[in-house]
Amino acid sequence: MRTTRTFRALHKLLLVAAVLVATQTTWAQAAPTGSATPSPTEERLRILEKKLKELEQREVEVFDRSVEERGRVKTFLNDSIAFGGFFESAVTGVTGVDTTPQVSAHSNTLGLNITAQFNERTRFVSQLLAGLAYTFPNPHNDSRGTPAQRQFGSPFAAALVAQAYSEMTFSDSYILQFGLGYVPFGTAFQQREPVLFRRRGGPTMLQSGSASSVGIAHPLWMGVNVHGSKAFTSSRVGYSAYTHSPTTDTKTLGLGGRVWSTISDDTTYGFSVQNGSMTGGSYTSMGVDFDRHAPWGGFVAEYAKNTRSDGTKLAESYYVEPYIHLDDSKVVAFVAADHLDNPFNTTAPALSDPIKKWVYGGGLNWLPIPFARFRLGYFQHRYEGSTATSGAQKRDFETYEISSGIAF
């Protein structure tokens, strides 16, 4: 900051000196020759010269000190720190054959994004999440759970560092990140802010974790993430490669990656893979995704499967979500068909409770301004095969909701 202020002062003095020199030149051409008495302008120039020399000397001293301290990491205050974030709130109603009808304003989430730009190539990015919610401890109506039926429960407040990483950009094709961030797996896992989802909460694959499995994939990269892209004649190709420590074996380091390409300016497809350690061996998750968007609307489709090293299926999920834009894109109508097969699902604290279900439904998004989203949604949850009941208790249920989100 001190160096920047010195440069600004030096720049201003140089501009003033240039103007005065030009003025003095004009006056000298018009003044009679042979005058021995310095003019007021000459006196000002002399004073400016003295000040410029003082500033140059000060700048040399500042530079010398900065060179001496280059090996140290320093705290600083900088004009290039940017703040942003989002807030999302939801009211949800639940009903079913063996589910007591209930409505709750159960979710309120605040996100704060902070970015510090050190220079053109180096920056720090972070996101803090805080929220107040009512728990939903038995979402799949397991008759052995507590409570014995699904219902909204006690209040829960928490704060979480969702991402925090330093980033160095060497080129478009080589960007290096250190820290913590959302895993570049498919499409849904990469959404940094809930307000970006047309369907509140996103696809079911995001809720596929359990006490013994990461579900579809571990949601955060940890350690190092390298990514980039390169433009070609009619497409752009990109990649990501990262490390992570999965919740299934926190003393190990797993690997993951994604490659993607654009077919056109509005169509992207990708392939993702993630590997990590767990009890009984290791797991490998693979997925493909397709995203098509246009002025009229578009659709997102994704498939992913996680398999243990002995061939056991840990989780499988796929969905398709088409949408159209109405009223000059201020209204978005969408439908969704979403499938989740999670043989390792658990009901708290650690009851094995395999599930296989479909979620059907749709809704409307209203975007009065580009930074705000209001949603109406209705969804049917239909369980399959042996997972359709728990004891004598049926699992099928319906949800209807209204939610809002704003980015700032």
Image (cartoon, helix red, strand yellow):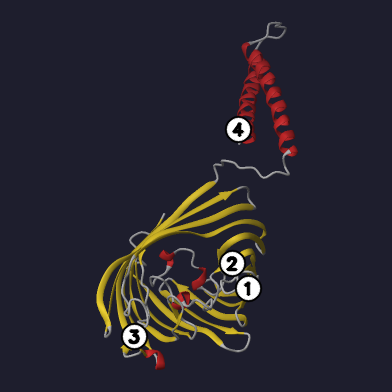
Q: Residue at x 60, y 36 (%)?
A: 1
Q: x, y (%) of residue 260?
A: 60, 74
**SS type, badge 3:** loop
Which numbered disc, 4 or 3, marks the residue closer to the eye?
3
Mark-to-mark CA distance, 1 and 4? 45 Å
Residue 173 or 316: which is nearer the viewer? Answer: 316
**SS type, badge 1:** strand
Residue named by callout 1: 256
Please tell me which of labels 1 and 4 falls first in the chain. Answer: 4
Q: x, y (%) of residue 207?
A: 45, 75
The amino acid pointed to by label 3 is Arg
**SS type, badge 4:** helix
Q: Residues within 10 Å of mark 3 (few under 14, many from 20)?
A: many
Query: Are circles 2 and 1 on residues that touch, CB within 8 Å?
Result: yes
Query: Are circles 4 and 2 on residues that touch, CB within 8 Å?
Result: no
Which numbered disc, 4 or 2, marks the residue closer to the eye?
2
Mark-to-mark CA distance, 4 and 2? 39 Å
Please tell me which of labels 4 and 3 falls first in the chain. Answer: 4
Mark-to-mark CA distance, 2 and 1? 8 Å
In the figure, residue 57 lies in which quadrant? top right
In the figure, residue 78 lies in which quadrant? top right
Q: Residue at x 51, y 71 (%)?
A: 189
Q: x, y (%) of residue 100?
A: 25, 79
The numbered dot on residue 221 is 2
Mark-to-mark CA distance, 4 and 3? 67 Å
Query: Are circles 3 and 2 on residues that touch, CB within 8 Å?
Result: no
Please tell me which of labels 3 and 2 falls first in the chain. Answer: 2
Residue named by callout 4: 5
Mark-to-mark CA distance, 1 and 3? 35 Å
